Image (cartoon, rainbow, N blue to C red):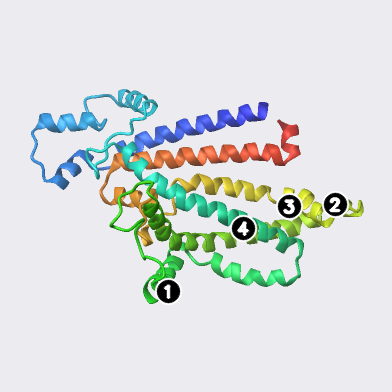
């Protein structure tokens, strides 16, 4: 219990620091976002209207930084992340809410599939080292070394241009409006297939290599040798004794990967013009949309912290030594 309380306190403090930095960065950046908004719409407004816009975006120069900070926390607790410049006057929370499900569906599902597939293959490859399974290692090393965007471009060239099996971009066909209609869901799955294949192929190689190397290391430990000497079945020794300990680093890596699911795979979403959080962040940076960037960074930061906390709790369940320390 003490361990859980300590980790909870640590993550709460880290979240407070992250939110504070998230508040300060846009206010310390050079330039005036309100003037950038006016220039974009070629607006000619008087000083009173400009002052109202500054107040609307929480950038009132007549208000102290501390007052702005207090108001910022009050808005966070009420779920108000401000207004987006890019999609003005739409709320940032609404814009993020439209893009987040696309990223969670694509990157979340592919991250889970890559982890389970890569970890399973890595367990058998590491346990049966020297077998024909080791022939997979050069292939996995090759794919692990290819950047996401390059593999995505190759996939588009081969499977969308030369052989038009899948669409090259977008999240769904232009003829549809986002809904839970089965035709739209089919279109969304069809458009997500190519980026999903790209992510899984790129990510699974790393999980295979990492798990295989840990299994090779753990297989030579004394407790594995003792378990084998007891006459336990090979399956039980492999999973209960070897894999349970070898998977601990992978659990930590998987938790981090889950945290970054919210941020999306930025380059993949750009290559495929997929309407997720990563693509939305790219649009926000290009338009100097500070409130939207601020909201996306906040969501990503909190997601990573939550994922790390889940990893710590998973360690409590998997590693008895951690429970004794707790």
Q: Is residue 190 visible?
A: yes
What's the distance in space between the residues labelled 1 and 2, CA to CA? 49 Å
Tag 1, which secondary structure? Answer: helix
Q: Quadrant of residue 173?
A: bottom left
- Select label 4 or label 3 by which is in front: 4
Quick check: can you spot residue 32?
Answer: no
Mark 2 → mark 3, Cα distance in angstroms:
14 Å
Q: CA distance from mark 4 to mark 3?
A: 14 Å
Distance, label 4 to label 1, CA atoms, is 24 Å
Q: Residue at x 50, y 67 (%)?
A: 146
Identity of the residue drawn at 71% across and 63% down: 125
- Of labels 4 and 1, earlier in sequence is 4
Q: Secondary structure at mark 2?
A: helix
Q: Name the quadrant of the C terminus.
A: top right
- Mark found first going from the N terminus, 2 or 3: 2
For disc 1, the marked residue is 158
Residue 14 at x, y percent in the picture: 50, 33
Give the mark, 4 or 3, whose residue is nearer the N terminus: 4
Q: Nearer the viewer, mark 1 or mark 2?
A: 1
Residue 243, labelled with which disc?
A: 3
How dense is the environment of label 4, judged by Cα within 10 Å: few (below 14), some, or many (20 and up)? Answer: some
Residue drawn at x 53%, y 49% as measured from the top left? 257
Q: Which residue is mark 2?
A: 222
Kindly identify the residue that appears in the image at 53 percent across and 53 percent down: 111
Disc marking residue 117: 4
Q: Position of residue 304 (x, y in %)?
A: 50, 42
């Amino acid at each position: 219990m003490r361990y859980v309380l300590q980790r909870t306190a640590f993550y709460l403090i880290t979240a407070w620091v992250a939110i504070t930095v998230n508040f300060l960065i846009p206010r310390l950046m050079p330039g005036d976002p309100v003037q950038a908004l006016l220039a974009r719409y070629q607006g000619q407004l008087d000083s009173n209207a400009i002052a109202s816009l500054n107040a609307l975006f929480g950038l009132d120069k007549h208000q102290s930084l501390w007052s702005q900070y207090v108001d910022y926390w009050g808005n966070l607790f009420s779920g108000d992340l401000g207004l987006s410049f890019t999609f003005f006057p739409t709320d940032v929370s609404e814009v993020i809410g439209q893009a987040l499900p696309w990223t969670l569906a694509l990157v979340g599902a592919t991250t889970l599939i890559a982890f389970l597939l890569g970890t399973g293959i890595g367990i058998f490859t590491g346990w049966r080292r020297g077998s024909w399974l080791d022939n997979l290692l050069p292939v996995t090393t090759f794919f692990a070394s290819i950047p996401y965007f390059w593999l995505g471009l190759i996939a588009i060239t081969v499977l969308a241009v030369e052989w038009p099996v899948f669409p090259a971009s977008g999240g769904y066909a232009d003829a549809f409006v986002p809904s839970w209609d089965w035709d739209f869901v089919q279109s969304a799955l069809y458009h997500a297939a190519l980026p999903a294949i790209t992510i899984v192929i790129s990510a699974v190689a790393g999980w295979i290599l990492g798990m295989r190397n840990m299994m090779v290391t753990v297989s030579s430990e004394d407790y594995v040798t003792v378990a084998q000497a007891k006459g336990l079945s090979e399956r039980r020794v492999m999973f209960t004794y070897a894999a349970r300990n070898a998977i601990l680093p992978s659990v930590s890596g998987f938790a981090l990967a889950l945290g970054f699911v919210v941020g999306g795979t930025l380059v993949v979403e750009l290559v495929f013009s997929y309407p997720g959080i990563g693509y939305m962040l790219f649009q926000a940076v290009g338009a100097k949309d500070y409130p939207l960037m601020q909201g996306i960074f906040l969501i990503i930061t909190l997601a990573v912290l939550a994922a790390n906390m889940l990893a710590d709790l998973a360690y409590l369940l998997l590693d008895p030594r951690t429970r004794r320390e707790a």
